[in-house]
Amino acid sequence: MQLLAQQLVNGIALGSIYALFAVGFALILAKMGILNVAHGTFATWGALASYYLVTERGLSFWVALALGVLLAGALGVAADQLAFEPLRRRGAGVFAPIIASIGIWIVLLTLAEAHAGPTAVSYPAESVPAEPFRFLGLIMLPAQVISVLALVVVVTGVHLLLTRTRFGSAIRAVAVDPRSATIVGVNARRTLIAVAFLAAAIAGLAGILGALSDNNVSATIGEGLLLKGFAAVVVGGYGDIRGAALVGVVIGVLEVMSSQYISSGFRDAITFGVLLVVLVARPQGVFGERQLVRA
């Protein structure tokens, strides 16, 4: 029982990182209508930037984390304004933004690989909190606690932003119809820039916390997060931030439990097999609404 509880804690902590990334990805997909496959590289660059600031500039981990998140957000805005905004103005449809995002992904990933090199590195031991502590007999690392707390704060903040503020109303209006939103006084372009920044910044935070938890900083951090985050968004329910976060946590728990009790070699197959069963049973996602198509 003790081992089960410990692995549950480990799974929730891992899933919190997946869930963080999924929240940002859900914002882009649902509020901007873009399947941005470059989203994982924002997480990668957030982690690389924070590592550089800690090791080369001597900044504290917390300052480096904040600056890494801001850099990731800035990359999200740059990608939106350089690639997606021109396509929106021209009414380019669904597939052109996907191709554009693939181009952004390849460019940013190539630059990350050139910057980071082939060898994974880790944060200096003295720069990050690492001393484990016990609670009710369970061992918890500071990185795990930080990840869970970050998820709670981000999900709560984003949910309140979207549902309780005037800016959230503007985001929802632009997501439904940018032209109509503009007619009633919403600055659609400014709103989309803010969404792009917020989503990419959350991805950067997920990348930094993932690197901290794994003690591994490399150019491929965002690639694994992209797959898990996309699965969480789809299974959680299109556009439901809380659903994406919950399924992200479930993915982490499934991975850890299957590795412990079945086989680490099959953990991805087991995890996505379970998600496939859920999706077949409920195609609109766990928290999504069924879409009715009328002739």
Image (cartoon, rainbow, N blue to C red):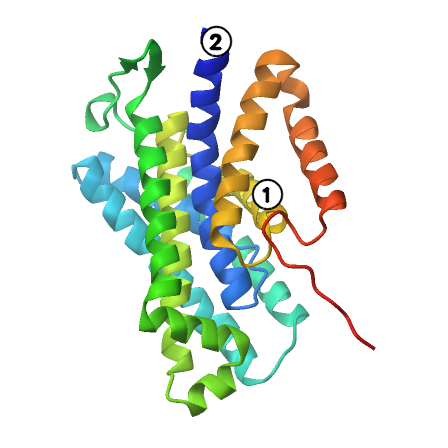
Of 242 and 179, which appears nearest the observer? 242
Relative to 37, say whether 18 is above or below.
Answer: above
Circles 1 and 2 in contact, beta carbons < 8 Å: no
1 or 2: tag closer to the N-terminus: 2
Corner quadrant of residue 259: top right
- Identify the residue at image location x=46%, y=77%: 173
- Identify the residue at image location x=48%, y=44%: 245
Residue 265 in the figure: left or right of residue 11: right
Numbered circle sitting on residue 37: none
Mark 1 or 2: in front is 2
- Identify the residue at image location x=54%, y=59%: 239
User: What residue would you read off at disc 1?
Assistant: 227
Relative to 272, say whether 264 is above or below.
Answer: above
User: What residue would you read off at disc 2?
Assistant: 3
> How packed is label 2: few (under 14 Cα within 10 Å), some, or many (20 or more)?
few
How far is the residue under mark 1 from the one under mark 2? 28 Å
Of 180 and 136, which appears nearest the observer? 136
Relative to 83, say whether 49 is above or below.
Answer: above
Amino acid type indicated by mark 1: Leu
Residue 135 in the figure: left or right of residue 178: left
Q: Secondary structure at mark 2?
A: helix
Q: Secondary structure at mark 1?
A: helix
Amino acid type indicated by mark 2: Leu
Of 101 and 181, which appears nearest the observer? 181
Coordinates of residue 162 in the picture (x, y in percent): 39, 63
Report the number of discs.
Answer: 2
Query: Does residue 50 show up?
Result: yes
Coordinates of residue 285 in the picture (x, y in percent): 64, 50
Query: Does residue 119 show up?
Result: no
Residue 273 in the figure: left or right of residue 77: right
